[in-house]
Structure formats: C-alpha cells, structure tokens
C-alpha cells in the first residue's frame, strides 16, 4: 500500500499541471471549427503535461483535470463543465487527452536524456495527435450517428493548430529538460533491465 | 470556484450526492438504450419536469444543454441526409436528454458535495488512497486561480514588450513558473507532514 502512495512533491506537480491545463483552456476560446468544437490552448496543456512531467504524473494531471470538469467546474473548452459534456458527443476528446498525455510522456521518457529535436517532434506529433483522435472521432461518430469518415474529414481543420502545439511542446520540453533535469526518469530504447547496477538505481528512483 | 451550482431547497438539491450520482448513472444508461422516438420524447418530458421541480431558471437550463446545440446543428442535418431523418431525430432527442440529465446533477450539487461523494465511492477500492485523491482534487481547485494568474501575467508581459508573439515565448516562462510553484507547493505539503 505504501508504495502506491504518491509523494508530496509529485502530488504538487500533478495539481499544478492539472490547474495549468484548466488555465490554458479558459482564455481566448474560439467556438468555431468543424462540428462546433472550440479551438483553445487546452491540447497544449495536455501535451505539455506528458512531455514535462512524464507518463505517470502527466496522465494523472489530465485525469484530475477531466475529473474536476466532470464534477462541475467550468474548465472545459468554452468555459463549460459537468458530466453532460464528459458523456456528451465531444467527451471522447477528453478521454483521448488522458491517452495523449500517457503516450507523449512514455515517448518523452524514451527520448531523454538527449531528447533529439526531430525524432521528438515526429514521435510527439504522431503519438500525441493520433491518441486524441483515436478516441474522439469514433465517440463523436457513434453518439451523433454520423459516418466516421465524415467526422474524420471535419477534424482536418484542427490539424494545423495541433501541429503548432506539438512544435511548441517539443521546443519547450527540450529547453526545460536541459535546465531542469530529473522531472522524468529517462528510459532509453534498447536498454535492458537485466539487474545491472545502473538500471537498479533507475528503478529505485522510479519506484 | 463554485462551478455551475444553482442554490435551492428542492428534493433534488436535498438528495444525497452519492445517491444522486448513482441514480444519474442508471438513468443515463437506460436513456442510452432507448430506441423509439416516443419513449425518448417521454424521457425528455420527464427531464424537463425535473428542471421545473428543481426550480432551475430556463436561462440556466438552456446554458446547461447549450454546448451540444453547436454539435447538433451540424450533426442532425448530416445524419438526416446520410442515414435518415428518423435516426437523426432519435439521436438528437437522446443526446439532449442525456446532457440535460447530467446538467441537472451539476446544477443541483455543490462542488464540495461531489468531492465528498467521490471520496465515499473510492473508499472501498483497494490500492486507492481516498484521502490523497481528495487532497489532490482540492489542491488543484486552489491552484487554478494561481495558474490563471501566471498565464495571464506572462501573456501581458509579452504584449507590453511587443517583441515576440510566438507561442513558445509564452510557454517557456509559463512552464518554468509552474514548476517553481509546484516546488513551493511540495515544500509546503512536506512541512505539513503529508509525506509522513
């Protein structure tokens, strides 16, 4: 039980990033785009949560953000909130955000400590954007009875904005991880956890 | 932050939050499986009646379902054209009813009552520390105004200098100040014995 407990420092980071997603969603929401989805900096907050504090804390931050919106705080896009939005036609995107933070965080842990710019950009773009739409598009299609192809086509309008947010996320993550190491435990590709001393310390820090 | 709560003394306001949440889940599930427009029409009429019972002003009731109208405005014609108008009507009735029911829960329950209900429902779960979850949610609610201030002041500073209008020039200071706030918050939590 004790090992399942989250430390006070992690708790603070999760709370601050959950609040950051809410703060980035609130200003300048433009209710426009296909199917009336508002364009905000919400996705930027979600991408940053994964890329800055990693898969575990980042995912929990998005879960907390989604949960507080569901409880009734007006922190969803367009100043909305409540269970009606979470289980409404656009609720799939909120669940997609949770997957997005996990995927981006997982990939970031594999790219660190070097975090090469172009691979980071490519992986974050594919992993981050796909995971949001993987849940959001079928959800919207099923709840509104609209053919999935038509919904997917409507999402094309959001791609340029999504790509800009990924670009910002990766360049910010590169700067922050260089200046502030230790936010995410690096887990490089192809390094096997065979009980060698360095891996043992990594595992201990992570636990 | 008080959310969308509308104060009142109706039956729905006085119902315990846990019971209300469980009732909502059951009702929404039933509505999701209704197939005939007549049954859905009755469900929507009952929901409307519940808004009257709860004493919710029509303006607030419309705001609760407002966000889905934008979606329906496009989805209904698209559905009617591609699938058929029967299906479009059923879909619209179902979406409005579900969203209105959930909105009714939000309008008649305070945020702190829902937080309490969440903790109560999490308590029996193994491996979940309900008190920590409650602390985390409460911490986040307190942190939202702080983070809004950070985001707002960074936006303002950039605008005042008029130098760099790129999103990156805003995001880097926002993240640095967020991490500093998280460090301070972590220190404060440790000082109060949260890790003991």
Image: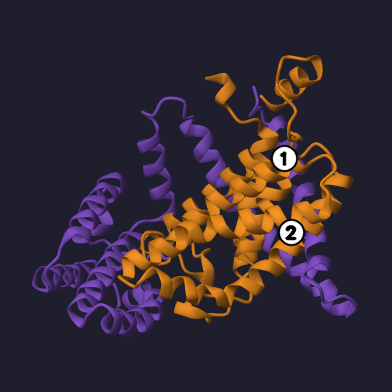
Q: Nearer the viewer, residue B166 or A152?
A: A152
Colour setting: by chain
Few, some or many residues within 10 Å of mark 1 (<14, 14–19, 20+): many
Q: Is residue B188 above or below residue A152?
A: above
Few, some or many residues within 10 Å of mark 2 (<14, 14–19, 20+): many
Q: Chain of mark 1?
A: A
Give me the chain that's orange: A
User: Which residue occupies 31% across, 59% down?
Assistant: B105
Q: Nearer the viewer, residue B88 or B186?
A: B88
Residue hosting label 2: A169
Image location of residue B186, percent across then percent down: 72, 38
Q: Nearer the viewer, residue B79 or B123?
A: B79
Q: Is residue A8 above or below residue B82?
A: above
Can see residue B139?
A: no
User: Which residue occupies 50% across, 40% down?
Assistant: B134
Compared across the picture, whether B34 is left or right of B5 comes to left
Residue hosting label 1: A109
Spatial distance from mark 1 to mark 2, Cα to Cα? 15 Å
The quarter in which the C terminus of chain B is drawn is top right
Image location of residue A63, percent across then percent down: 52, 48
Q: Secondary structure at mark 2?
A: helix
Q: Earlier in the sequence, mark 1 or mark 2?
A: 1
Image location of residue B57, percent across then percent down: 30, 77
Compared across the picture, whether A139 is left or right of B28 comes to right
Image location of residue A194, percent across then percent down: 71, 17
Q: Is residue A204 above or below residue B111?
A: above
Q: Secondary structure at mark 1?
A: helix
Q: Chain of mark 2?
A: A
Compared across the picture, whether A168 is left or right of B5 comes to right
User: Which residue occupies 36% across, 65% down?
Assistant: A88
Colour used to depict chain B in the structure image: purple
Compared across the picture, whether B100 is left or right of A90 comes to left
């Amino acid at each position: 039980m004790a090992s399942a407990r989250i430390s006070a420092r992690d708790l603070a980071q999760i709370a601050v990033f959950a609040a950051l997603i809410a703060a980035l969603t609130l200003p300048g929401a433009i209710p426009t785009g296909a199917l009336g989805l508002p364009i905000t900096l919400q996705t930027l907050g979600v991408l940053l949560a994964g890329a800055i504090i990693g898969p575990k804390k980042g995912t929990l931050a998005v879960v907390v953000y989604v949960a507080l919106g569901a409880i009734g705080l007006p922190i969803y896009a367009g100043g909305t909130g409540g269970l009606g939005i979470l289980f409404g036609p656009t609720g799939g995107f909120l669940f997609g955000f949770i997957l997005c933070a996990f995927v981006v965080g997982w990939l970031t842990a594999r790219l660190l400590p070097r975090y090469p710019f172009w691979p980071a950009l490519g992986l974050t773009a594919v992993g981050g954007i796909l995971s949001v739409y993987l849940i959001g598009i079928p959800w919207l299609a099923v709840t509104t009875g609209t053919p999935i192809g038509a919904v997917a086509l409507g999402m094309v309008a959001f791609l340029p904005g999504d790509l800009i947010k990924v670009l910002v996320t990766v360049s910010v993550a590169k700067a922050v991880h260089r200046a502030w190491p230790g936010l995410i435990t690096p887990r490089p590709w192809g390094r096997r956890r065979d009980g060698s001393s360095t891996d043992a310390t990594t595992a201990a820090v992570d636990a | 932050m008080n959310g969308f709560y509308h104060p009142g003394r109706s039956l729905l306001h006085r119902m315990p939050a846990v019971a209300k949440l469980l009732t909502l889940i059951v009702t929404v599930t039933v509505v999701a499986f209704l197939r005939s427009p007549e049954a859905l029409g009755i469900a929507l009429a009952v929901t409307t009646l519940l808004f009257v019972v709860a004493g919710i002003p029509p303006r607030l009731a419309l705001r609760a379902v407002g966000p889905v109208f934008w979606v329906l405005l496009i989805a209904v014609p698209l559905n009617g054209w591609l699938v058929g108008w029967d299906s479009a009507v059923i879909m619209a009735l179902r979406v409005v009813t579900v969203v209105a029911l959930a909105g009714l829960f939000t309008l008649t329950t305070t945020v702190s009552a829902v937080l309490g209900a969440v903790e109560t429902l999490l308590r029996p779960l193994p491996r979940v520390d309900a008190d920590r979850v409650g602390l985390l949610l409460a911490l986040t609610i307190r942190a939202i105004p702080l983070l809004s201030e950070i985001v707002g002041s960074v936006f303002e500073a950039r605008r005042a200098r008029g130098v760099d209008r790129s999103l990156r020039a805003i995001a880097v200071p926002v993240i640095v100040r967020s991490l500093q706030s998280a460090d301070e918050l972590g220190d404060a939590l440790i000082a109060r014995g949260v890790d003991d």
